[in-house]
């Protein structure tokens, strides 16, 4: 908030000086050596990094951040209840109002239009990737989905909704704020219609295929938009082959493979609702004849398919396999267990791949880096007595931008390996 101060001369009614005074904000002073990460661009300030506050601050309030020498670093939202005490929102002094959000969202939209010019459904705002920590906005054709995971953003939902209406004039704005992160901010789940009208699933286009998305009740915000580019990249290996799409959800990889000319695609997911929806989507795209679907635990299925009796030989039968499981870990402490899980499914997969076959595999956990993920794949290949040729490396779609100074923005990694022998 700003006040305007006017200095008048004694002999004139004309102002000599007009200057603006920023209303005093509580100042968060950082400990020595804690400012470098902020200067580099990381927006999170943990409680242990704070030296002191110059005055009490209300949770959700905008505060200014300075280093221990009183040098200004930026402004952000404060929350004493969170391990992340401050989320920097700007390296400059700004007024956070509806016009601020409109400007930031338009800037994020420009990035999507540049790198995904033909997409009509995509992530508009990806939190830290777009310098709006704690805010996600997904666009499904003319319907927007808003998700907040930080108190400061949650308190400013009316401003955000107003900005979205101004930019997009959407049919509806839906809130899906039900992530586990909200409890660390002292926030309850919040779901429902924020604006407009919405009746039933939304029909969207991804790379020319028609999908249906249950925005109000579906998983996450409705669909995994971060694989939009990879769906097509992996499909190029499918022509004429037998394809297995594991952890298929709504069939993103499998249906793209079927359209690309696969002889047959078998899809596996433990959600009966997801399999039912995929069956409808396959029919709507004229791909039912090429697809079969199964509601099953993928670990159990892979184990059963690779079990052999003594003196029996397993005959590999797939030319392309896709492994796109949900995250196996949400903390560093459970990374060893996650790596064992990844090794298990890859060991089974290699036993089912024909020589010359392709395995496209993905990991969506930030806590498992690309090197560790590749190493566990190679360890599984060694145990399965397979030699691999790496033919592709994948990342998240460009509507989920990666900011190297913020490692948390890079979470999805993937590879395609050819079984050489």
Image (cartoon, helix red, strand yellow):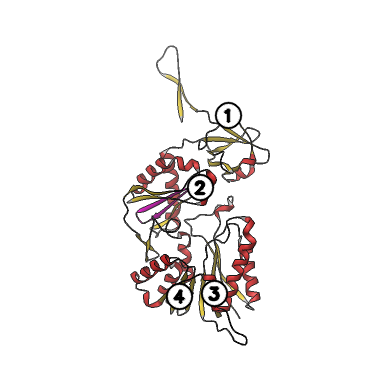
**Badge 1 or badge 3: first in the primary sequence:** 1
Figure quadrant of residue 347: bottom right
Mark 2 → mark 3, Cα distance in angstroms: 35 Å
Coordinates of residue 296 in the picture (x, y in percent): 48, 71
Q: In the structure shown, which secondary structural element does the residue marked by tag 2 occupy?
A: helix
Is the Cβ of the residue at disc 4 closer than 8 Å to that at disc 3?
no
Q: How many marks?
A: 4
329 vs 260, nearest the viewer: 329
Mark 4 → mark 3, Cα distance in angstroms: 13 Å
Coordinates of residue 345 in the picture (x, y in percent): 57, 71
In the displayed structure, would residue 129 be above or below residue 336? above
Q: Which residue is mark 3?
A: 302
Residue lying furthest top: 11
Indicate which label's residue lies in the foreground, 1 or 2. 2
Residue 371 seen in this snapshot: no
Indicate which label's residue lies in the foreground, 1 or 3. 3
Q: Which residues are magenta?
A: 130-149
Q: In the structure shown, which secondary structural element does the residue marked by tag 4 occupy?
A: strand
Mark 1 → mark 4, Cα distance in angstroms: 61 Å
**Badge 2 or badge 4: first in the primary sequence:** 2
Mark 2 → mark 4, Cα distance in angstroms: 37 Å
Classify residue 88 as left or right of residue 278. Answer: right
**Badge 2 or badge 3: first in the primary sequence:** 2
Which numbered dot is residue 55?
A: 1
Which is the main secondary structure of the residues drawn in magenta?
strand
């Amino acid at each position: 908030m700003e006040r305007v101060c006017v200095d008048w001369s004694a002999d004139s009614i004309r102002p000599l000086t007009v200057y603006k005074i920023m209303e005093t904000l509580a100042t968060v002073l950082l400990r020595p050596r804690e400012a470098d990460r902020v200067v580099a661009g990381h927006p999170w300030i943990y409680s242990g990094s704070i030296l002191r506050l110059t005055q009490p601050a209300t949770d959700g309030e905008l505060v200014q951040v300075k280093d221990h020498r009183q040098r200004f670093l930026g402004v952000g939202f404060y929350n004493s209840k969170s391990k992340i005490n401050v989320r920097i929102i700007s390296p400059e002094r700004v007024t956070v109002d509806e016009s601020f959000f409109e400007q930031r969202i338009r800037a994020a939209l420009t990035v999507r239009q540049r790198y995904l010019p033909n997409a009509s459904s995509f992530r508009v705002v990806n939190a830290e990737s777009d310098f709006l920590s704690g805010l996600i906005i997904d666009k499904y054709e003319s319907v927007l989905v808003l998700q907040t995971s930080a108190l400061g953003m949650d308190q400013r939902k009316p401003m955000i909704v107003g900005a979205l209406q101004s930019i997009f004039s959407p049919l509806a704005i839906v809130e899906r704020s039900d992530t586990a992160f909200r409890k660390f901010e002292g926030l309850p789940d919040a779901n429902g219609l924020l604006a407009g009208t919405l009746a039933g699933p939304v029909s969207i286009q991804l790379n020319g295929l028609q999908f249906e998305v249950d925005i109000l009740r579906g998983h996450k915000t409705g669909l995994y938009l971060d694989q939009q580019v990879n769906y097509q990249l992996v499909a190029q290996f499918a022509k004429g082959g037998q394809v297995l799409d594991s952890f298929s959800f709504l069939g993103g990889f499998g249906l793209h493979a079927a359209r690309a000319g696969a002889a047959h695609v078998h899809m596996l997911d433990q959600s009966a609702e997801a399999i039912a929806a995929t069956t409808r989507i396959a029919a709507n795209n004229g791909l039912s004849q090429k697809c079969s679907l199964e509601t099953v635990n993928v670990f159990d299925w892979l184990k059963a398919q690779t079990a052999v009796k003594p003196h029996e030989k397993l005959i590999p039968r797939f030319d392309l396999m896709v492994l796109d499981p949900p995250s196996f870990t949400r903390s560093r402490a459970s990374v060893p267990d996650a790596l064992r899980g990844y090794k298990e499914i890859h060991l089974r997969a290699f036993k089912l791949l024909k020589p010359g076959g392709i395995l496209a595999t993905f990991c969506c956990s930030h806590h498992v880096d690309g090197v560790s993920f590749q190493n566990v794949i190679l360890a599984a290949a060694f145990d399965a007595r397979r030699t691999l040729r790496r033919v592709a490396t994948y990342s998240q779609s460009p509507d989920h931008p990666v900011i190297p100074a913020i490692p948390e923005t890079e979470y999805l990694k993937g590879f395609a390996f050819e079984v050489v022998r």
